[in-house]
Amino acid sequence: MQLQPIHLSSGNLIADRRFEWARDCEAKGDLAGAADLLVQALDLAPAYAPAWFVLGELREKLGDRAGAIAAFAQARAADPQDRHGAALHLVRLGAEPAGAMPESYVRALFDGYAAGFDRALTEGLSYRAPELLYRAVAAARGGQRMKFGSVLDLGCGTGLAALPFRPASDWMVGIDLSPAMLAQALAKGLYDRLVEAEVVQFLAAEAALKARYHLILAGDVFVYLDDLAPVLHAAAQVLAPSALLAFSVETHDGDGVVLRETLRYAHGEAHVQAALSAAGLKPVSLDFASTRTEKGAPVPGLIAVAAV
């Protein structure tokens, strides 16, 4: 999934029309013509963030890396919230180091996909994270009947990861940045509490209240975080004794963190191990498994279960 340009007016009717003509040219395969129209639009409306963002994409496709970097930098400058995620493209192009994804970008991305999210994942991408997490947690419990007093679902989305765990949970809390995704989750009736918040900030607030959870889930959410150490440390602070943390990540052959072409972070096994250790968490299991496909090919991943 990638965010489509947000439909905002530049405030200049002619610039808006040239932007739309550029999109039409792009759809027809005339990338150079589309780029030229965008430059014309930006001459009229220099602070038009969507035009800068699309120009960056087109320049990259045309082989103009330096021009793409310049355009993405202008897009971010024109929209300090960076709702298009221009900063991520700068990271991907090697112009800036990896960093946290803009919250506004993540919110806009999932608000836009909420209505068709479940079908897109389960039918289009063969999404298996909920099933794999459930199996891993069951194995960690040694085949014993699973029962959890309180469960926290980080980045809960529409509730896919929580679904198999609900029958074994007395109290379930879901947290997500996207109000549209939370609306989908609410309609399913899986959660006793739903909260719109950023994950690390929420965990810190819960720790201050001395809240404790018997199971924390994070299915397909850590791919939107670069360094796992802060979130794992924050999660460790709200785990009850003998509780478990189960999460999925995409991975790669190296040790560190890379931003994939899909604008999702992939974490090396060594990074995951180091982040768990720094958080004071002990790995119960760490298994290689693909949770989804991209363009028909399995995406390498890890399913982790850890305890205090």
Image: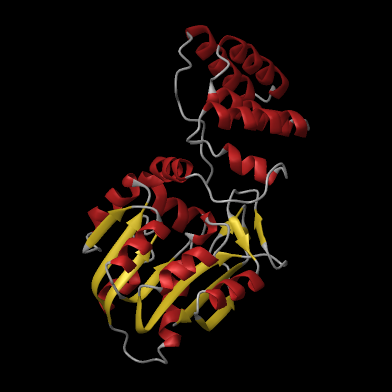
Q: Residue furthest front?
A: 208
Nearer to the camera, 14 or 72: 72
Q: Is residue 158 visible?
A: no
Classify residue 61 as left or right of residue 106. Answer: right
Q: At 51% across and 31% down in the image, what residue appears?
A: 5
Q: Position of residue 140 (x, y in %)?
A: 44, 86
Q: How are the colours assigned in the image?
A: secondary structure
Q: Residue at x 24, y 54 (%)?
A: 186
Q: Residue at x 51, y 39 (%)?
A: 3
Picture quadrant of residue 276: bottom right
The image position of residue 308, as x and y in percent, is 44, 83
Horizontally, residue 45 falls left or right of residue 252, namely: left
Q: Is residue 201 above or below residue 168?
A: above
- Give coordinates of residue 160: x percent, y percent: 37, 62
How many numbered tags mark residues here?
0
Frontmost residue, 56 versus 25: 56
Residue that sits furthest to the top in the current view: 14
x then y, percent, for residue 174: 31, 61
Whether residue 23 appears in this view of the structure is yes
Query: Residue 152 vs residue 10: left or right?
Result: left
Within the image, what quadrant is residue 190 found in?
bottom left
Q: Is residue 255 above or below residue 8?
A: below
Q: Which residue occupies 52% across, 12% down? A: 17
